[in-house]
Image: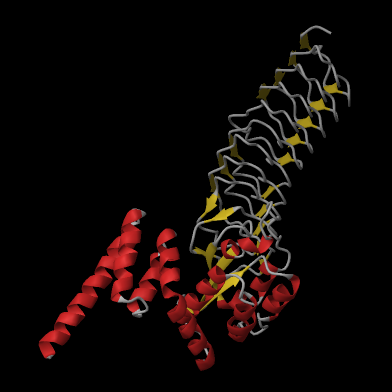
Amino acid sequence: MDEYYVMPEGETAVESGAFAKNKNLKHIDLRNVRHIGAFAFQECTGLETVIMSNVEVIEKGAFEFCRNLRSIVFGNITDIGDIAFFHCGKLDIPEMPRSLAKAGAGAFSHTGLKHADLHWFEEIPSSLFSYCTSMEYADISGARVIQNEAFAGCRELSYVRFGDLEKIGERAFRKCDSLELAVLPGTLQSIGDEAFERIRPGLIIPKGVCHVGGNCLGPVDTRKKVSIYRAMLYEFRNYFRNDRIVPEKEGEDEHFYMYESSIDVRVLDDATDTAVGLLPLFCDLDPKMRSDLIDAFREDNTFDYWMLDTVLFSAMSWNQRCRDKVAVMRMKYPYELSEAAREEYARYLCAHADRIARRAIWERDTEVLSFLCENDLISRGGIVKLLDYSISLSASECTALLLECQSRLDWHEDTLLEEL
């Protein structure tokens, strides 16, 4: 067959597998063809351009593994089947035809698409754009459902336009490293397992969400802050059910990552949006600790802080960074904090304040540093040393905070001298 092929005028369909594995074909004009059968051009690895001005239906795998396919001219296409353009790595479609009413699972998976505008679709099928590694933008503002892995592996995807979305499937945006989720639609009701890779600190999960999937806010090896409403607190226990332990790195214990896998859960009052609780929690726990953590979520949408103050704090004795975080957060936000637990945390913080402060400076964590200063847990001499350390790290915000603390202490001392 010649490199350039024109379908005869009378042909209105391409039979299944008709041109499969034809390595010579580079350009084809389908003329009056309205229907392309399953796997019709599968593995035509030399194929570069296709003109299909009258095609309405493309069946399953029609252009699968056409690795050099770069350009398609659509007409009134209405239906594209499963994996129709799977692994057409060089294919970019600048504008999806508005006539398209249906697309199958994985139809554009592993293609070179840079943008995806299907704002008229009410459902985004499974794996539709998975591993389109050049994709940067998607408009799916008409979708109510995003199925599993729809955009998984789109590493350059940085913006997605949502509308009245109700369901996000499992791993829908997994490995989308450039997409940092800041806002979720208020219409959302369900978030699947491992749905996202990254979230913006302080993300609020909408009130209407009634299903939270395991590890739905990203890998356990990154710290997160999220706000949820009290009405969904019990449901949030599922976040910890199927999370994955971070794989062991050579020469390091897997639990080295526990501090990095923390999630601060701020619980909001359903009516006033004010905080009624804060839970500094962890994801990569051993099975017994994870079970205890899940059991601490009560069916009346409350949390058993006793478990956090005793079982979890005690079990983390080998990991000071985890204990530091829990101690500071529990003292700073003392929801249901017993007197015994308060005394235990106070003793711990007094004994480790300098080390915790240095860690806070290293991480530019002004919230922790401010707490230590405001509660006079750092001595005057300690502040001087911390200032030197902060300046050496060019931690400007921490330096400013420490200078303010030092000034406050100096003023307090001057006042005492005047009184004497």
Residue drawn at x 58%, y 33% as measured from the top left: 114
Q: Is residue 355 visible?
A: yes
Horizontal side of 5 relative to 419 (left or right) equals: right
User: In this rendering, is residue 408 above or below 173?
Assistant: below
Q: Where's residue 97, x and y in %?
A: 63, 32
Q: Where's residue 307, x and y in %?
A: 63, 83
Residue drawn at x 80%, y 20% as measured from the top left: 44
Horizontal side of 202 relative to 38 (left or right) equals: left
Q: Where's residue 59, x and y in %?
A: 82, 33
User: In this rendering, is residue 302 above or below 321?
Assistant: below
Residue drawn at x 69%, y 52% as measured from the top left: 171
Outermost residue to the left: 418
User: In this rendering, is residue 90 above or below 396?
Assistant: above
Instruction: Tell me which corner region of the image, top left, top right, bottom left or bottom right, holds residue 107.
Output: top right
- Front one among 333 and 144: 333
Q: Is residue 333 visible?
A: no
Residue drawn at x 73%, y 40% as measured from the top left: 103
Quarter of the image with the N terminus in it: top right
Horizontal side of 92 relative to 66 (left or right) equals: left
- Count how many numbered circles sit on residues in the image: 0
Q: Where's residue 259, x and y in %?
A: 57, 65
Quarter of the image with the C terminus in it: bottom left
Outermost residue to the bottom: 339
